[in-house]
Image: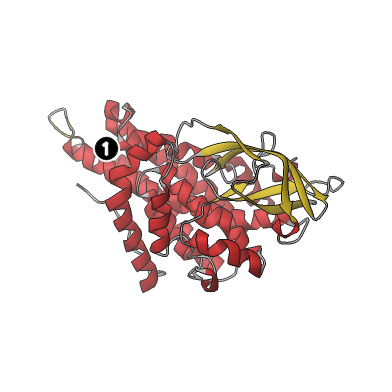
Amino acid sequence: MTEFTFNEPDLLDDDLRLIRAQVQRYVSEVILPLGEEWEKAGVVPRHVFRDLGKLGLLGMRHPVEYGGSGLGAMSSVVFGEELGRGSFGGVTAALTVHSDMSISHIAHRGTHEQKQRYLPAACAGEKVGAICVTEPHAGSDVAGLKTRAVRDRDGWLINGSKTFITNGVHGDIYIVACRTDPAAKGSRGISLFIVEKGNPGLKVTHQFEKHGWRASDTAELFFDDLRVPADALLGEEGKGFYYIMSTFQNERLVAGAMSVGQCAKAIDLTIDYVRQRQAFGRSLWDQQVVRNKIAWLAAKAAAARSLVYSCAQMIDEGKDVVREVSMLKAFACETLQEVVHGCLQLHGGTGFIIGTPIERMARDARILTIGGGATEVMLEEVAKRM
């Protein structure tokens, strides 16, 4: 079996190299053998979160005093890339939504009491997080969300719905974006709240059957007079939109890392296949057009990977990288489409059969040009800053 790898960048210290090795080992020993079972069940088992929590991989970006490791953006890149190489997009989605896209709101903006209450269990994988922003009529247009939170006695009353929520069925800690000031226009007047599993006002109304990412549970949620105490407000009232936009930068970085990991795996699988597959009296690898096609896909993937690591380095240096991360999200996720479909083409009819890794990877890849900011939205973010 071939193993296609990129050269390791000098940006990684010994700790990050150890993290990469830990994730690689877990992918090889647990995710690859069991991933198909999780695809059929439509859920990543809770023991996976606990396993990775024990390894310290779910709280790498969170404060040390609350069970995390206090590491930077580069740790998220290594984590996302190696999970991406695991070839099960739904597993990667469930884990990174928890580690990098939901609980991070508490790590960045929570009070001491909120961090103390939620972060240790989240870092340990005992509690799973979900970020609840998208609504039936508000996706990339976050400012258009309509779920309402109004003051009620000593707390808040939430009504509305959210859709396409990863970890929505089996999650424990929901970060919910609500409009708290209906008179405020656009991005103003949105706040974030922490909602816990078991709240009687929280209804999981639908679990989606999806084209890809089938191992992750994705739900439609309904909030029916859901009451939360005053201390469920996360950060400052009315600042929710800006918090979401800030966290989006990390989400898009991780999407880029996931993409390049999946690119490497797809190329890996394809090199192995074309070296074995015989056609016209010799292996497909012996056909120059095939070798050139794979080399071109590898070059595009390498370029995307360089941009991923460059953006992570700039984030860790405290630079404003909205433009660069938007470029990354568009380029890496679109490159992934070219790579997986190019690799599927080289698999021929085998690549069209359900149960082959490249077929699953092609399905899983499709959402990455949509979720976390569609390609068209990302290009507009770039254009506005040119």
Which residue is rendered at x = 38% and y = 34% of the image?
Answer: 40
The image quarter containing residue 133 is top right
| Residue 287 seen | yes
Q: Where is residue 172 in the image (x, y as percent from the top left)?
A: 55, 50
Most foreground residue, 117 or 373: 117
Q: Position of residue 123 (x, y in %)?
A: 49, 62
What x and y, as percent, mark residue 193?
A: 69, 53
Q: Which residue lies furthest to the right in this view?
A: 183
At label 1, the amino acid type is Val
Q: Please tell me whether mark 1 sits on a helix, a strand or a loop.
A: helix
Judged left or right of residue 36, residue 248 is right
Question: Is 169 drawn above or below residue 122 in the view shown?
Answer: above
Residue 162 found in image quarter: top right
Q: Is residue 169 left or right of residue 158?
A: left
Q: Mark 1 = which residue? A: 290
Question: Number of labelled discs?
Answer: 1
